[in-house]
């Protein structure tokens, strides 16, 4: 089990970095002023230089992805879908909130924290529902094929 978690963390880490990079590119395109916004300005102030801020954000993006990758082993258990979902959501929330807070991906206020968790849960639910729907369709197709072969 530990080996599986480690392997998933190692797979998730570069995905976290890639997603983080895509998000910064999207933000820069949305701003549409010809500049690339690699990090939020407050992070540059926190770490002294832009390159320091980018480096720290890259490391934390790797950790963010590793947390999601490692937590994915929960889906391999024999638990109920509800228990797996709640456990995965809690682990991912606990693992990623400090990263989002330290990287200033949210306002450092009660409202900012509430908005972060609201957005986190909304995105989580959208992804979960799309995954669930896709799996349900695959299972229905397999069942249909089995019934046709009887």
Image (cartoon, helix red, strand yellow):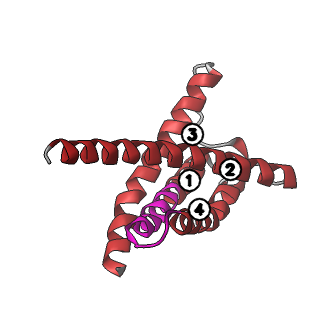
- Earlier in the chain: of badge 2 and badge 4, it is 2
**Distance Cα–Cα, label 4 vs label 1:** 23 Å
> Could you give the CA–CA distance between mark 2 and mark 3, rounded to whole angstroms?
10 Å
**Residue underneath mark 3:** 38
Return the residue nearer the eye: 11 or 73. 73
Q: Which residue is drawn at 68% across and 45% down?
A: 119
Identify the element where label 2 is drawn. helix
Percent coordinates x, y for residue 118 in the rendering: 73, 48
Residue 93: image quadrant is bottom right
Identify which residue is drawn at 31% across, 77% down: 3
CA separation in Å, label 2 and label 4: 27 Å
Q: What element carries label 3?
A: loop
67 inside magenta stretch: yes
**Residue 127, position in %: x, y?**
51, 45
Within the magenta stretch, is there residue 39?
no
**Viewer can see residue 45:** no
> Where's residue 60, x and y in %?
54, 59
Q: Name the residue under label 4.
A: 89
* Precedes in sequence: disc 4 or disc 1: 1
Against 82, residue 118 (above or below) is above
Q: Earlier in the sequence, mark 1 or mark 2?
A: 2
Q: What stretch is highlighted in magenta?
A: 61-81
Q: In this view, does 50 lie to the left or right of 128?
A: right
Mark 2 lies on residue: 43
Q: In this view, does 94 lie above or below 122?
A: below
Q: Nearer the viewer, mark 2 or mark 4?
A: 4
Vertical position of residue 90 compared to residue 125: above or below? below
């Amino acid at each position: 089990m530990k080996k599986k978690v480690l392997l998933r963390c190692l797979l998730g880490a570069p995905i976290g970095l890639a997603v983080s990079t895509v998000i910064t590119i999207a933000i820069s395109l949305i701003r549409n002023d010809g500049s690339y916004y690699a990090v939020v300005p407050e992070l540059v102030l926190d770490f002294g230089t832009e390159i320091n801020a980018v480096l720290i954000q890259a490391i934390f993006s790797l950790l963010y992805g590793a947390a999601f990758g490692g937590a994915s082993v929960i889906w391999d258990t024999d638990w109920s879908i509800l228990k797996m979902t709640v456990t995965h959501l809690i682990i991912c929330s606990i693992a990623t909130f400090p990263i989002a807070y330290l990287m200033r991906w949210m306002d450092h206020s009660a409202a900012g924290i509430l908005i972060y968790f609201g957005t986190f849960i909304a995105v989580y639910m959208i992804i979960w529902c799309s995954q669930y729907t896709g799996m349900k369709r695959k299972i229905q197709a397999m069942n249909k094929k089995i019934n046709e072969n009887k």
